[in-house]
Amino acid sequence: MSAQHEVGRRRTFAIISHPDAGKTTLTEKLLLYGGVIQLAGAVKAKRGRASAVSDWMEMERERGISITTSVLAFPYHGLKLNLLDTPGHADFSEDTYRTLHAVDGAVMLLDCAKGVESQTRKLFRVCRQRSIPIFTFVNKLDRPGRDAFELVGEVESVLGIGVYPITWPIFRSGTFRGVYHRLRKRVYLFDKEHANSSSGSGAERPPVEVTGIDDPLLREALDDRGYDQLRHDADLLDAAGDGFHREKFLAGELSPMFFGSAVNNFGLEAFLETFCELMPPPGPRESDQGPIDPAGSEFSGFVFKIQANMDKAHRDRVAFVRICSGKLVKGMKVHHVRSGRDLRLANPTQFLARDRSTVEESYAGDVVGLHDTGTFEIGDTLTGGSSFAFEGIPSFAPEHFRRLALVDPMRRKQFSTGIEQLAQEGTVQLYRPPAGRGGDLVLGALGQLQFEVVKYRLEAEYGVEVRVEAVPWQLARWASRVDGAPLAPEELAGAVEGQVVLDVRDRLVVLFDREWALRTAEKFHPELLFAETASGVVVRAA
Ligand code: G4P
């Protein structure tokens, strides 16, 4: 098969949601529909353990390196869907954001009773920065929830994106009974009896084709009240919106919305079919030498995540690479742009559903795992020989802060090496006082679990015991001058009520103990910029 054909059938995406909205359930159903798993409940097997910390360590030990859940690749109607996992719950971390830099689109999953929740909002913002297409799936329609119009309004106003409902819920005697597909003019009715059949699409009867909302067939399929309601809603929708604009969707400005119930297999077929139709294959990706064509012949990709092994016996790591062009073949030689060195990919790993196996060949849109002994950093570019670099992955302001206290002062050197390496790897952010100023090393992370990871790894890999202690900081912002002129740490310290520190790349950061202190600094110093993200620095060999 030609590379063009292979790239054209790949769809690489992530599901973004707040914990409990149904991401695990939806993932599982997608695998069921893809024919990859036969039994509901398979994905959920890992749930229900006592705590996320022990869960994570146990899993790491069991599996060596737990990579299988990082990407699920599965076939669907001739396409190859690559679903990248965005860790949530306690393991929410920068990796969650970084993963969104490796996808070409996202499905935003909402609980119909809760609407847009905090974690969804954060993840959405990252997608928005990249202008990638975003689908919205409103879940749990089988339960009492908010009015569908209200949910459309909330997504539009809270997230600032246009919404086009492609399916619309149909109720019968107040119970969710189906969806009307506005573009296809089809009705999908659900059969509660088969709702929990494990064969995937068992809950849905074959869709009824109708010519439009006035079709007598549609009237027949519904009771009077349900029909009147749907008609009324459809008229309102038609009057309110101006059609579905594919270009706006592709630019990330308009989100097609779907309704359903993942656990009951309701509305999934209508969603999946349309998803496959609309979701774009990998497109060109920006580099410092212009856009790189995914169907181009030269291999290229970038590292978006590095996962360390928790098992002392295996201190290796896995670097996850998103392929952006060309073909990756086992044993091939690639150019590591940052170091200027060439490497042989002896054992690239790919993921098919829940298993991993050695890659024979992979194309743009795929994700492969590379065995790493410390060569790779987040954002590194690999090519077939050229020296271009993809745009770096930005750093994101952490939301939790801690200080590490060394238990045995004699281990200071190992401590410094260890913590520096973990920060370089992107496990946590590390802040140190500028030269000549006293102060503690402060760690920052997006999720609290990261501190446990650091403590565990310092002990396991560097033989350093530490205590994790609280600090007053609540917010971190990268500081710079609006006009781009240099900014000295002393000057900044005089201007803000917060602690001035440097990150691992020597960028100036201010730690604030309250939102108010940040707002005050912004108000009184319009000449300064306090940024929530810092652009990824693309470093190349001289
Ligand atoms: P998450 O990965 O986003 O955190 O969510 P997950 O799929 O684990 O779902 C969270 C809870 O919501 C689960 O219930 C799940 O069964 C339920 N759920 C998912 N989709 C639907 C739906 O369409 N309708 C209804 N009513 N519930 C749904 P749980 O009680 O926490 O777990 P479990 O005992 O069911 O496994």
Image (tube, grey):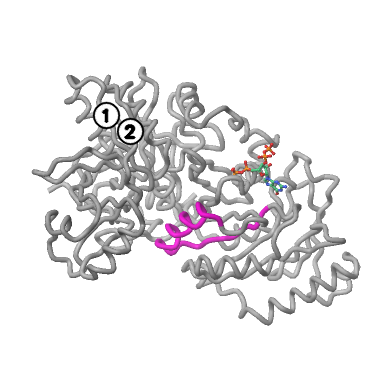
Asked which secondary structure carries label 1, the reply is: strand
Residue 55 colored magenta?
A: no
Q: In the picture, residue 235 is in which quadrant? A: bottom right
Q: In the picture, residue 411 is in which quadrant? A: top left
Pointers 2 and 1 in contact (CB under 8 A)?
Answer: yes
Label 1, on which residue? 405
Q: Is residue 327 visible to the viewer in this orientation of the structure?
A: no
* Residue beneath the point at 22% across and 68% down: 525
Pinpoint residue 196: horizontal percent, then vertical percent. 78, 42
Label 2, on which residue? 469
Q: Nearer the viewer, residue 437 or 218?
A: 437
Residue type of the residue flagged with mark 1: Ala
| Outermost residue toward the left in this view | 436
Task: Looking at the image, tell me whether mark 2 or mark 1 is earlier in sequence order.
Answer: 1
User: Does residue 471 lie above or below 481 as drawn?
Assistant: above
**Numbered tag placed on residue 302 in the rendering:** none
Q: Nearer the viewer, residue 539 or 50?
A: 50
Pinpoint residue 258: horizontal percent, then vertical percent. 66, 61
Q: Which residues are magenta?
A: 117-139
